[in-house]
Image (cartoon, rainbow, N blue to C red):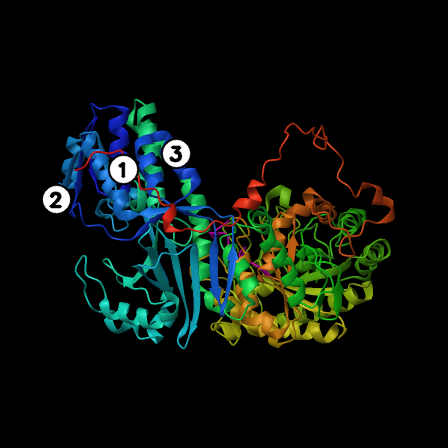
Amino acid sequence: MKIAIVGGGPGGLYFAALMKQLDPSHDITLWERNAATDTFGFGVVFSDETLGGIGNADPVVAEYMSRRFARWSDIDIHFREETVTVGGQGFAAMSRKELLELLQRRCIELSVDVRFSTMAPPIEELEANYDLVLAADGVNSQIRAKYADAFGPDLDPRTNKYMWLGTDQVFEAFKFFVKETEWGVMQIHGYPYSDEGSTFIVEMHEDVWHAAGFDETANDVFPPGVSDEKAIAKIRSIFTEELGGYEVLSNNSKWLNFNTVRNQSWRKGNVVLVGDAAHTAHFSIGSGTKLAMEDSLALAACLHEHADMEAALSAYEAERRPVVASTQRAAQASLEWFERIGQYKDQDPTQFAFNLLTRSRRITQENLRLRDPEFAEAVDRNFADQQDLPTVAPAMFQPYRIGGLELKNRIVVSPMDMYSAVDGVPGDFHKVHLGSKALGGAGLVMTEMVCVSEAGRITPGCSGLYTDAQRDSWKEIVDFVHARSTAKIGAQIGHSGRKGSTRLMWEGIDEPLESGNWQAVGPSALPYGPGNQTPLELDRAGMDAIKEEFVAATLRADQAGFDLLELHAAHGYLLSSFLSPVSNRRSDEYGGSLENRLRFPLEVFDAVRAAWPAGKPVTVRISATDWIEGGNTSDDSVEIARAFVAHGAAGLDISTGQVAKEEKPAFGRSYQTPFADRIRQEIAEPAGVAVIAVGAISTYDDVNSVLLAGRADLVALGRTHLYDPQWTLHAAAEQEYQGPGAQWIPQFRAGRRKPPSSRTDAVRPRLSLLREPDSEATSAHLRWTPDTLAKEPSLLPSK
């Protein structure tokens, strides 16, 4: 093959070296516009997984890298004049300059034509004259920009400002310095990379950056290689204590906004993107160098395995995309956490440290328990101490009070529509469904959305509270839960709005009824989606009538004996559709501004709160984002939450979306939790109001992690409880918890231990005379000290 490579960073160099090793007859030319000695940055970090791949692909490079690594396992989190150290993480880093020199020499040794200080020929010329063109030209890729129609780039510049610096202070561990200054919170990401220095990345929100006067040089243009010395001098002054007398080092250092790069495709004909040209992941979660080298390894392997170019490039993208997507999801969660770091400035240091470590949702409580058991236990103790709880237990089994209602644990069975009522009357199915979840150990069991009128139903199978017969049937269910379990039960009431008069879920979710339909209503005459009924725009009389229906349903819910009432103002149903500008286009006092769009939902809430007994809590479910351009955002949800709290809501159930069919949710593990987290920090916790997190939370480990980090007070699980009605009790058994937070009823008590499976509990004989030391215990804390650096000569020839 005749191969052209544009970009002489680690990705391009490593690909050239690998291809030459696979077949020395490949004709490879690499262009790099910078000089060979122009190296920007300080240290790069690798995972053990990546190092294993490099070792298999090029043992010579891997051996040299291993000799130059700084290795450690500790993370030090400096926060509010305390240092929390967590071990067992495992890091390996080296100088970026040394890595580039190594790869350059390796390419020259293998006879790659490397042309430094040389601009590559036009891409059209390369396409025509080479079998393969590798675009390794970085985050500002000119090749990607040239063929934007083919690659479909999506660039997401973020709000935080950061500067990549170094220091001659050799850190012993990964360092997070979180500093509250007079202008706001600033943070340092620091780690050692050799026996001579450490990477020192300064980051802060753009508002803090402006307040601190760093925008003084915002309009200055710095040539390549020139650093922002005014800003660096100010950084030295601010972080004098953290530097401890050591120097700040610069290398092409200037303020940047991180840009998350995604592409719909990584290939066009014989042109293929790798590394930052194809994708970026925030520096707080991983190394762009690591991703680029992994790309190069996978691409070289796929080209070697497939004779056809199209098949090879297709295989490369199919192999790498899931890996990159997973990394980018974690990186997105991490960068957003650091963008909001100021909201955690009042947390206890131990909780803050746990919060920081679990920010990407890749690390959890159980994961930390394996890495550093002492820290994991300290987090549990701290959680109990901070909330004045009498005993230390898994967070999910600690009691919680929402308003005047005492819950035995923090697990909620999320409202789930069952579409199984007849004329709005719940029957035996609902009794078994909700009763089994109560017997299964949850602290609070919620009904599906119970409709306030016949016309307020979503489907013909939806339950209601608009007749006495419905009330009486609900009372039987409530009485069963109270008599047979220690769970509490709440009713969620709502009106379908423009999403009404549709089929049962399994007949076509949100699809209109073929017959027997009824008139849907909404704030505006806008259908939910193509094919849906156009709703009747409500006038004042219609709004008043619906408000009275909510009140009547509230009174019946109390008569049925429910412990808690939740107002459904999410998912595009009637109250939600008033809140969202996507569905509310009114020009009167109930449309337009957010204040106006809140008016009717708040009127309904006030009426419901007045009708519901003062000693019982009322919560509200909201959609914290519409996942659609022009819809409500996270900022809007904070103000919506603030308004409901001001009107007396005892809790906020934070979901997202389902407001319009054209939404584009960012699905992923615990993907809705950050919205609950923000509302809890900014609104709910200061007001003493509960926040319930929902959405793709399925393990007790994730539940505990959410609670311990302070992201929510309660966690609601839906599909998980459909899979296992006794999920809460099984979670207690797996954590070896026995206590008031998870009590088996007498009839089921014999099953409270997990049944043994084949030989898993077998007693193993001792087969050694002397016991080996506990490797996990002895390696939990590893610090980097320069005298551990190997000084063997290089295996590679000199330039």
Count of numbered badges drawn on the protein: 3
- Which-is-in-front pick, marks 3 and 1? 1
Left or right: 491, with 34 as reference point: right
Left or right: 453, with 256 as reference point: right
Residue 308 shows in this picture: yes
Q: Can you tell which mark lies on residue 53? A: 3
Q: Amino acid at mark 2?
A: Thr
* Residue 356 drawn above or below residue 646: above
Q: Which residues are magenta?
A: 654-667
Q: Secondary structure at mark 3?
A: helix
Residue at image coords 81%, 47% = 428
Residue 135 shows in this picture: no
Residue at image coords 65%, 55% = 716
What residue does disc 1 label? Answer: 793
Left or right: 558, with 684 as reference point: right
Q: Position of residue 87 (x, y in %)?
A: 51, 51
Q: Can you tell which mark lies on residue 135? A: none
- Which-is-in-front pick, marks 3 and 2? 3
What residue does disc 2 label? Answer: 118
Query: Which is more N-terminal, label 2 or label 3?
Result: 3
